[in-house]
Image: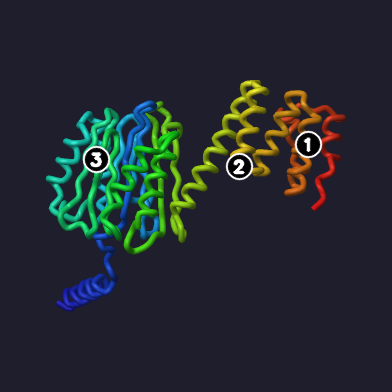
Amino acid sequence: MRILKSLALVLLSVAAAQAAVPQVSPIRPVATYSIVARATETGEMGVAVQSHWFNVGGLVPWARAGVGAVATQSMVDPSYGAEGLVLMADGVPATVALEQLLAADEHSNIRQVAMIDGNGNVAAHTGSHCIEHAGHVVGVDYSVQANLMGPATVPQAMTRAFEAAQGALPERLVAALAAAQAAGGDIRGRQSAAILVVRGEATGRKWDDVVVDLRVEDNPDPVVELTRLLQMHRGYEMMNAGDLAVEEGNLRGADYFYGEAERILAGNPEARFWHAVALVNAGKVDESLPLFAKVFHADENWRTLVPRLIKPGFLDADAAVLSSIISVIPPQR
């Protein structure tokens, strides 16, 4: 009897302790406005989103190469993303997949979800209890959706911006976010943003299927910062192309790609350094020296790095060439 009483007291203590710990609410107003879209020319699919909520990129955008993309928001339920992609991977059109998930959700009236599949089928839902202003617009190969908006015209502003934007899909997605913010955006303000874009067809290498995956977790102007990061991403894409050209022995191509990276990244020492290395490997030592000088001006550690590139074969330089590089004088500070 004494043992039973002791056990009962322990269980009561555990229950009281659990009751005292705040539980994580399953209802979180995570997102405000987003866009899901597919590029007709390339088949790429993606999501871009902005919110007055920390780490919006961790819950709202979902995408899988060759399958589709999903934005799940308002009182967010991430299972729409995970399960929506599973259904679309099994060949279920986005329209049917969304219908099935909504039918199984007893809280569908507080959800806002958009999906697009690899065939360009688009589906969107704005629950009747999403916080005003809330709504969505479905177009050809895209859907824009917003809730908790200041003005009700935000989705229309996103639509116009996306349809008018030029260039690749990621830039067009971010243009839609910028238009939403310019139109009044989230009534609560702004905090985080994210973009996720995948290839139209899976390569079998998951690490190669993602075209862009960028997040701004906490920033006073997250869409502006996301735009800057996308520009930097493009610059580093050029550097990656330059690296690949070096591996393939295409020194002319390496010179071009590193030069483009330097232009896009506005004098980033990394891009300038590898551009200079590519010039040396192409036999253009004299052209490389002014670039090396500027890099060494930014940080002398780059000068220390130069000789270390010879042994693994990244720099083709004899003693005389190496000496000319190492002894180059940086511009006056």
Disc 1 to disc 3, how far (Cα)?
Answer: 57 Å
Disc 3 to disc 2, how far (Cα)?
Answer: 36 Å
Residue carrying label 2: 265
Residue 246 appears in view = yes
Residue carrying label 3: 138
Please provide percent x and percent y for residue 69: 31, 38
Secondary element at image label 1: helix
Residue in view at x 20 percent, y 32 percent:
93
Residue 58 appears in view = no
Secondary element at image label 3: strand
Secondary element at image label 2: loop
Local crowd at mark 3 within 10 Å, few (<14), some, or many (≥20)?
some
| Vertical side of 96 occupied by 131: above or below | below
Residue in view at x 38 percent, y 48 percent:
177
Task: From the image, state whether disc 2 or disc 1 is nearer to you.
Answer: 2
Q: Which of marks 2 and 3 precedes in the sequence?
A: 3
Disc 2 to disc 1, how far (Cα)?
Answer: 25 Å
Residue carrying label 1: 307
Nearest to the observer: residue 27 or residue 207 = 27
Task: From the image, state whether disc 1 or disc 3 is nearer to you.
Answer: 3
Local crowd at mark 2 within 10 Å, few (<14), some, or many (≥20)?
many
Q: Which of marks 3 and 1 precedes in the sequence?
A: 3
Please provide percent x and percent y for residue 260: 61, 33
